[in-house]
Image (cartoon, helix red, strand yellow):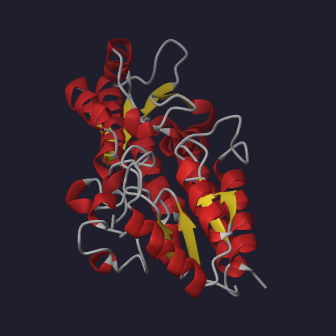
């Protein structure tokens, strides 16, 4: 997976921790939010921002540190953002995903900081093969450059609706703690979101149950959790950095995999270059399509929010894998 495109676990965790910190500061003061009386939540990047908005609704004001179109891993925090961070009631981040965020969160002094990486179990995923088979992924080192985050864990937990629901529950609990006056609403909204994620999980299960192939090739090895959840094999072209050039040996491996596993499509994503995907597709006579790791929503995203983009991902996977 490309390093640049990958969101380290630490970063995610940081985001969450940030959220939690904000939460504490708010509850410690006994009052909530700024002049408008809303709970001020700062989220490090889109998946955490979306959860906070869905659960907090009218009771929160959510600020995202990563603007649309910015690759989260590349984020640099401005002094102004650092100051805003310190004023948040709750900070949500994913530790090891965005080093700049981790640092800013640590210095923020916010009491209610929530690290999303602590809300679900993170796993290590390889660039190749069944994703619990990280150890078999290119022993000569090619598998290793796909790991980021603490102990080489994969931060992209939000692409698994089941794990994302676990994060949602943790964020909901943090908001209840920070703003006990609206705890009942946060609980109701959390249950609603978890229910929608369970429905999405069922759609993926049913939609990918019977396919001609179980293998997909992608530039960004962000889909390890999704692949493992639904019994697929993810083959990543490059390392953690989506912009990095894969070795000729890796390209040759992928051509062999494509042939052996009836692969029809090479996936690229919206926030990173599609150059390597197109090169491989041309060399192997394959099609290209989009598989979005949902690190941010832009005008070019195949949907307006998490659920719409995930359903687009499902449709694209069904088409590529030959769903029956």
Q: Nearer the viewer, residue 246 or 158?
A: 246
Q: Taking the image as drawn, is residue 191 in sight?
A: no
Farthest-out residue, right: 324
- Residue at (43% x, 24% y) in the render: 32
Split into 4 quadrants, where in the image is the N terminus? bottom left
Give above or below for 207 relative to 65.
Answer: below
Whether residue 75 sits left or right of residue 259 in the image: it is left
Q: Where does the image place residue 314, in percent across and percent down from the top left?
A: 69, 66
Picture residue at 39% right of the left edge, 45% below the top: 174
Q: Which quadrant holds residue 230?
A: bottom right
Identify the residue at horizontal 46%, vertical 67% (top origin): 251
Observer-nearest of 250 and 132: 250
Image position of 206 (left or right of 132):
right
The quadrant in which residue 123 appears is bottom left
Residue closest to the eye, 313 or 203: 313
- Place of residue 60 in the rendered image (x, y in percent of width and height, measured from the top left): 54, 30
Residue 127 rendering spot, x and y as whole percentages: 39, 68
Of 50 and 319, nearer the camera is 319
Q: In which quadrant is the C terminus drawn?
A: bottom right
Q: Is residue 311 in sight in this rendering?
A: yes
Q: Is residue 101 left or right of residue 274?
A: left
Numbered marks: total = 0
Snapshot quadrant of residue 99 = top left
Image coords of residue 61 (percent x, y): 54, 26
């Amino acid at each position: 997976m490309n390093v640049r495109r990958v969101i380290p676990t630490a970063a995610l965790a940081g985001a969450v921790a940030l959220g939690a910190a904000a939460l504490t500061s708010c509850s410690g003061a006994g009052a909530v939010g700024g002049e408008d009386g809303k709970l001020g939540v700062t989220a490090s990047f889109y998946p955490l921002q979306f959860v906070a908005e869905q659960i907090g609704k009218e009771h929160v004001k959510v600020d995202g540190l990563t603007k649309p179109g910015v690759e989260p891993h590349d984020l640099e925090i401005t002094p102004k953002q650092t100051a805003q961070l310190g004023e948040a009631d709750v900070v949500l981040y994913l530790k090891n995903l965005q080093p700049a965020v981790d640092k800013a969160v640590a210095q923020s002094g916010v009491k209610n900081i929530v690290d999303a990486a602590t809300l679900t179990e993170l796993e290590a995923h390889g660039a190749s093969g069944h994703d619990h088979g990280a150890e078999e992924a290119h022993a000569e080192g090619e598998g290793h450059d796909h790991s980021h985050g603490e102990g080489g864990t994969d931060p992209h937990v939000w692409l698994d609706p089941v794990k994302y629901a676990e994060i949602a529950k943790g964020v909901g609990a943090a908001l209840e703690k920070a703003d006990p006056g609206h705890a009942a609403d946060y609980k109701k909204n959390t249950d609603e979101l978890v229910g929608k994620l369970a429905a999405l999980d069922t759609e993926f299960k049913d939609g990918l149950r019977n396919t001609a192939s179980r293998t997909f090739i992608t530039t960004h090895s962000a889909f390890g959790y999704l692949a493992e959840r639904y019994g697929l094999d993810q083959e990543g072209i490059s390392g953690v950095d989506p912009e990095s050039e894969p070795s000729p040996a890796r390209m040759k491996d992928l051509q062999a995999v494509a042939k052996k596993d009836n692969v029809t499509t090479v996936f690229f994503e919206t926030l990173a270059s599609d150059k390597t995907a197109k090169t491989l597709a041309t060399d192997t006579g394959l099609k290209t399509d989009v598989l979005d790791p949902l690190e941010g929503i832009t005008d070019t995203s195949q949907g307006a929010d998490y659920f719409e983009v995930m359903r687009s991902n499902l449709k694209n996977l069904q088409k590529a894998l030959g769903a029956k």
